[in-house]
Image (spheres, rainbow, N blue to C red):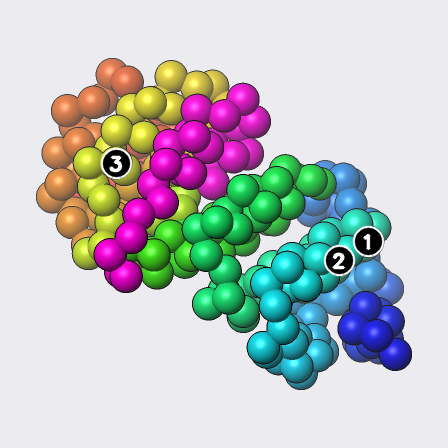
Amino acid sequence: MDLHAELKVALEAVAEPGRAGPMQAYMRDQFVFLGVAAPQRRTAARALLAGLKGIDTETLLEHAQLLWQQPEREYQHVALDMLALHRRQLGIEHIPALLGLARQRAWWDSIDGMAGIVGDVLQAELQRGGDGRAHMDTALRHDDYWLRRIAMLHQLGWRGDTDAAWLFGAALALAHEDEFFIRKAIGWALRDYARHAPEAVTAFADAHRQQLSPLTRREALKHQPR
């Protein structure tokens, strides 16, 4: 069997149909589910995805696209698991393809997963002395708010590698938006950076109290002493 047929067999073997309805409801009935919880999904697919080591990047992206086209949501999650596992095969030249994939069947779960992958690719490039920030500058201005969310979240977990000036500038650039997923993303990105630089985040949130929404401020300062 090929990869996709084997993945189908592996996932269906651990599916719990009784979980499918609640999982679908949690995603506001936008997607159908097999009923496979995340730990079981990762375990079932691990060996198959690990077996892709060494394949060329274009084939990796083709597999991701095919998985993205499957109706059950677990397959998009498997695609994200696959891309994360083989992220070292991805370079900044592949970011447009990753962002294009993210725009298909977009919702917060796939968007946030892709933000982590894009962030890993960019961080690796920066650590090699390269750049790639232009991709996030473009995404930050994109008409699709899901791409703006990816741009806002891509530095999660970077700690000392975070470009604080870019982070704070992006927060202000998006602060006027009413979209819940944008306001939440700004707060999440600031809260994450606060683990590394709490005083800087508190000072920023206080200085821009009028621009930042109450939701954003609550998220940003959630773990800060006040």
Percent position of residue 45, x then y: 70, 75
Percent position of residue 86, x then y: 54, 69
- The answer to whether the residue labelled 1 contacts the one labelled 3, judged by CB atoms less than 8 Å apart, is no
Q: Which mark is residue 67?
A: 2
Instruction: Assess disc 2: are there few (<14), some (14-19) or many (≥20) residues with their C-alpha within 10 Å of its C-alpha.
Output: many
Q: Residue at x 82, y 53 (%)?
A: 70
Amino acid beneath label 3: Trp
Instruction: Assess disc 3: are there few (<14), some (14-19) or many (≥20) residues with their C-alpha within 10 Å of its C-alpha.
Output: some
Q: Which residue is mark 1?
A: 70
Q: Residue at x 17, y 32 (%)?
A: 204
Amino acid beneath label 2: Leu
Q: What's the magenta region?
A: 127-150
Give the distance between the C-alpha atoms of the residues marked 3 and 2, in whole angstroms: 33 Å
Amino acid beneath label 1: Gln
Q: Which mark is residue 166?
A: 3
Give the distance between the C-alpha atoms of the residues marked 2 and 1, in whole angstroms: 5 Å
Give the distance between the C-alpha atoms of the residues marked 1 and 3, in whole angstroms: 36 Å
Residue 41 in the figure: left or right of residue 167: right
Residue 119 on the magenta segment: no
Q: Earlier in the sequence, mark 1 or mark 3?
A: 1
State which quarter of the image contains the C terminus.
Answer: top left
| Residue 97 visible, this angle | yes
